[in-house]
Structures are given as structure tokens and as C-alpha cells.
Amino acid sequence: GQSLEQPSEVTAVEGAIVQINCTYQTSGFYGLSWYQQHDGGAPTFLSYNGLDGLEETGRFSSFLSRSDSYGYLLLQELQMKDSASYFCAVRMDSSYKLIFGSGTRLLVRP
Amino acid sequence: DAGITQSPRHKVTETGTPVTLRCHQTENHRYMYWYRQDPGHGLRLIHYSYGVKDTDKGEVSDGYSVSRSKTEDFLLTLESATSSQTSVYFCATGQDNTDTQYFGPGTRLTVL
């Protein structure tokens, strides 16, 4: 079967840097995406990696290693508003369907 | 935002009753998706559509059917609701050449 593994919870201090890892085992791979979801809200797209390497978007960066079936989301200069759940998602084929991980709940403390 | 609305936003129903959830988009996106979200499971794909009248099953499609008669509307039907279908349902849309999906606000469904 297909699986995406990410930590269930991460706690960090305001202003710090936190890394959320995602490892995947899927029958195919087109790309890795990251989504953010605040409590009671809808998921929103954060970042995408189709090729190996680092993608940077402001305070957020995402990294992919296809050979290791591994990626991570890096959040810098953490703010209280970054407290949310973060999901990695993999597209396995040309159908534009995504498989999501179970999510990582990030708690940012003062 | 992709202009996605879902209706109803909240619904309580009884086991065995039919339920239809509606997703409406104003962005003319080709792809539409229905997910359910349960604690500890993330988002799981129920069905998706790749065009008008073109649909396919996702990973948790049993007990659900969908229809897409217009580009802007994607309906999810529970023919006979069960308590295991109590969940939060999200609709999403997407386009060709990008993995980005845009999510609606969600529908909280409770089956008693």
C-alpha cells in the first residue's frame, strides 16, 4: 500500500526554526506538496517540490530527496500564527490525485 | 482563493437517510475532489472528477457516489448514511500542470 509518514506533533519556541519531516512509500512519484491547516479551517497550499533540492517561499522552505523518498518543510522565524497542522502530500501519477500524510501538529510557544 | 463554497456547512442526520453535499466553484478549474478528514487519518480521497461527467474512485469510496453535470458543481451523495461516515468533508479543485489544490471551507456531517 501507499504510505506517508510524518511526526504527529512538534513543539517549538517563537522565533526558532523547526523542521517537519515526511517519508513516503508510494508506487509512483510525481511530486511532494505541503499544506497548512489551522484548527477549524481548510487546508491551504504552502509549497511544492517536483525535483530534488530546496524551494524557498519567504519564511517557509521545502526540500526533497527522491532517492531517499524523503522531504521536509522548514519554518523559520516561527510566529504564534504558525501553530497549525502541516500535511505532506504525494502525487503518484498523471491523474493529479494526491495522497496525504496524517499531519503534524505544530505548537509554537512564547 | 479559488471561490469554492460548500453546502451545507453543518448537517446532523440519522442512520439510513440519504445525504447530498454540494461543492460549487467559480474558477472553472478542471479537477474537483471530495475528501474526508478524521482525527489521525489526515485527508483521504473519496472521489474525484477530471471533467464534466468524468469521475473516478479514491481510496475510501465505499458508501459514496458523486456526480458532476456542470464544471462548477460536484455533488457527493451518501445513499444511506452510517455512523462511520460522521466526518468533516472537504471539497477541493485543481488545474492541469500544477499539484496545487484549493480547498473549500468544509462540511461537518454528524450521523446519529
Image (tube, helix red, strand yellow):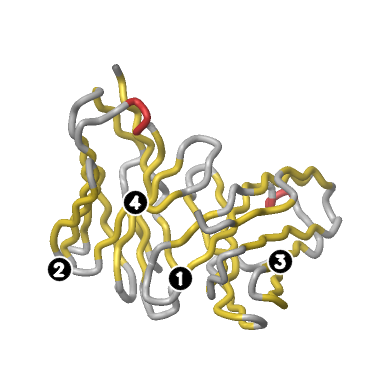
Q: Quadrant of residue A60?
A: top left
Q: Earlier in the sequence, mark 1 or mark 2?
A: 2
Which residue type does callout 4 highlight?
A: Leu
**Which residue in the structure is indicated by mark 4?**
A46
**Which residue in the structure is indicated by mark 2?**
A67
Quarter of the image with the C terminus of chain B in it: top right
Q: Earlier in the sequence, mark 1 or mark 4?
A: 4
The tag on residue A97 is: 1
Alpha carbon of mark 3 to alpha carbon of mark 4: how far? 27 Å
Which residue type does callout 3 highlight?
A: Leu
For marks 3 and 4, give the one nearer the viewer.
4
Within 10 Å of disc 2 (Cα), the crowding (few <14, some 14-19, many 20+) is: few
Question: Between residues B28 and B37, which one lies in front from this camera angle?
Answer: B28
**Which residue in the structure is indicated by mark 3?**
B75
Marks 3/2 in contact by CB < 8 Å: the verdict is no
* Mark 4 chain: A
Residue occupying the point 71% across, 70% down:
B65
